[in-house]
Image (cartoon, rainbow, N blue to C red):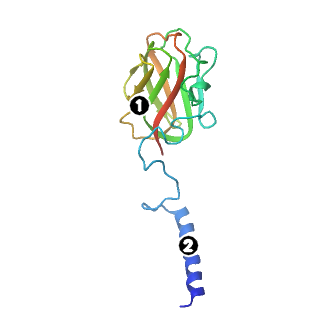
Amino acid sequence: MGASMIFRFLIVFLISFSIAESQYSFPHYSAKKSTTSGTPSYDNPMGMGDRQSSIAESDNGAFGTGGIAPIINGSRTDETTWFTSQTASGLEITFDFGAPQIITEITWYQSSTAEHGTWIIQAHNGGTWNDVGSSFTLGGATTQVITAPSSNTTGYRYYILVGLSGTTSDGPYIHEIEFKLVAE
């Protein structure tokens, strides 16, 4: 077999494999780029840093002047966002990641140790909201690691923090929220 024949064979093989890979699932090969070997990490895309162009966020009146956008801008020292002092029950902070993410931990940064009531994390992919872990007290530290979703193994596009009871404090600035995640 000449060199040109081997070269043609390799080209045909690679083209055939590429077409087949796009039509079938191969368990040991994926053209999809994975995150840090499937390991949850704050360093994975959308975990931390300025994510304002990657994550759509909203709230239903939870925050005062300053809005919600600064809590995903990558700055742990911004002093532009705070809760309004109100009943936490029914408040919602929603994040649309654009594609499913497996979140296993959240870190919340604020300027004082004030508490904001009892909250729960819920998630969905276009259907019913599912609880992701148990309820927790939001705040209480300037850096709070929220481990409620630690056993989450499902990727969801939408995550929401829902206030259940208690009162939010308008005292601390809310600096940042970061997500320990694996992109699905």
Residue 111, disc: none
Q: x, y percentage for residue 97?
A: 55, 37
Q: Mark 2, residues whose alpha carbon is within 10 Å: few (<14), some, or many (≥20)? A: few
**In the image, what residue occupies the spot 55% across and 62% down?**
22
Q: CA distance from mark 1 to mark 2?
A: 43 Å
- Nearer the observer: mark 1 or 2; the answer is 2
Q: Tell me: 9 left or right of 132.
A: right
Q: Residues within 10 Å of mark 1 (few under 14, many from 20)?
A: many
Q: Which mark is residue 14?
A: 2
**Residue 11 higher or lower than 125, as above or below:** below
Residue 28: image location, x then y, percent:
42, 61
Element class at badge 1: loop
Per the image, label 2 sits on a secondary structure element best described as: helix
Task: Quickly name the residue at label 1.
Answer: 132
Q: Which residue is at 51% across, 41% downward?
A: 100
Is the C-beta separation of discs 1 and 2 under 8 Å?
no
x 54%, y 76%: residue: 13
Closer to the camera in the image, 120 or 130: 120
Reply above or below: 25 against 163.
below
* Residue type for callout 2: Leu
Could you say which quadrant of the image residue 145 lies in?
top left
Give the mark, 1 or 2, whose residue is nearer the N terminus.
Answer: 2
User: x, y percentage for residue 77?
Assistant: 55, 23
As drawn, 146 above or below 17: above
Determine which quarter of the picture holds residue 141: top left
Q: Is residue 7 left or right of residue 165?
A: right
Q: Position of residue 161 (x, y in %)?
A: 48, 24
Outermost residue to the bottom: 1
Identify the residue at image location x=49%, y=51%. 34
